[in-house]
Amino acid sequence: MTEICKMTRPLISAEAISRSYLKGQHKVPVLRGAGLTAHRGEFVSVIGQSGSGKSTLLHVMGLLDSPDIGEVHLDGQRIDNLNAAARDQLRNRVFGFIFQFYHLMPELSLLENVMAPLMIRHSILDFWRKRKETRAAALEILDQVGLSHRVHHRPSELSGGEMQRGAIARALIGKPEILLADEPTGNLDAETGHGIMELLKRLNREQQLTIVMVTHDEAIAAQAHRTVRLEEGRIQKVLQQEAA
Ligand code: ADP
Ligand code: MG
């Protein structure tokens, strides 16, 4: 395993996060002071039952949602209270996201899906200027995830495992520091899910990619360096250390 320096401050930390949602007239607390950190190069998993708030915590950490109370820090700097433009930029540059249902755009080829985040990042003009290098970078990442033979296919022509590999490639094209994975194997059979976990572990090991993954599956969670459990809106306990 790569050396993870835990003497330094965490790369990302969600601190004492509370978040409620309105259900009809009622305010339902989902997170009640949940805290989660990841150091650079660490692969952390969060396990919890369906409805325990795993996705909410991941969304707060990745600035897709805001906490009612609590703070999110990136490399020691508070980021949850930045203005919308700064948050958008961080979301696009610092975080990569993957989801249970891939969220690839159905009308685009796999290659176009992987290039899309850089279209959003750059102005149209810049994108056209850089399209050759962007295309080359997308092809290289698709090769890394084992999809060189599928680049011109649309998502509907791909298997679940291929779609998730494509989603991982799309998350990586912007060279994120942190990959946030929400049940990445939740829609896949065991063998295909195993392949996705092997890919995530390889990216963590070889590129020191920091990964925070949430799952309800103990066996999947146990493949990270460290697992914590989300229960009753809080991180309850550390289940295992340094397993990966
Ligand atoms: P998990 O990912 O662990 O299954 P979630 O974070 O998705 O849990 O959801 C936790 C609870 O918060 C659920 O009861 C869900 O219905 C509720 N919830 C999540 N997001 C929203 C939202 N945007 N609006 C209203 N309720 C929500
Ligand atoms: Mg969820």
Image: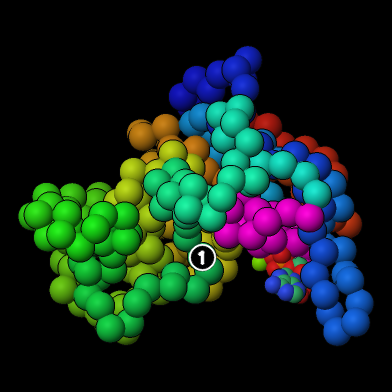
Crowding at mark 1 (Cα within 10 Å: few <14, some 14-19, many 20+):
many
First to last magenta residue range: 48-68
Predominant SS of the magenta segment: loop
Front-most of residues 12 and 243: 12
Q: Which residue is mark 1?
A: 99
Q: Residue 113: x, y in percent?
A: 28, 68
* Quarter of the figure with residue 232: bottom right
Q: What residue lies at 56% left-to-right and 50% top-to-bottom?
A: 83
Q: Judge: label 1 CB < 8 Å from ligand 2.
A: no
How many numbered marks, from 0 up? 1
Q: Residue furthest top?
A: 7
Amino acid tagged 1: Phe
Q: Residue 44: x, y in percent?
A: 61, 41
Q: What residue lies at 36% left-to-right and 34% top-to-bottom?
A: 207
Q: Can residue 235 be seen in the rendering of this structure?
A: no
Front-most of residues 225 and 14: 14
Provide the secondary structure element on which disc 1 rests.
loop
**In the image, ligand 1 is in what quadrant?**
bottom right
Q: Residue 217: x, y in percent?
A: 66, 60
Would residue 83 be counted in the magenta stretch?
no
Q: Can residue 21 be seen in the rendering of this structure?
A: yes
Q: What residue lies at 49% left-to-right and 47% top-to-bottom?
A: 86
Would residue 59 be counted in the magenta stretch?
yes
Compared across the picture, whether 127 is left or right of 19 comes to: left
Front-most of residues 241 and 72: 72
Q: Is residue 189 above or below residue 174?
A: below
Q: Residue 73: x, y in percent?
A: 63, 36
Compared across the picture, whether 51 is left or right of 2 comes to: right
Front-most of residues 233 and 160: 233
Compared across the picture, whether 60 is left or right of 151 comes to: right
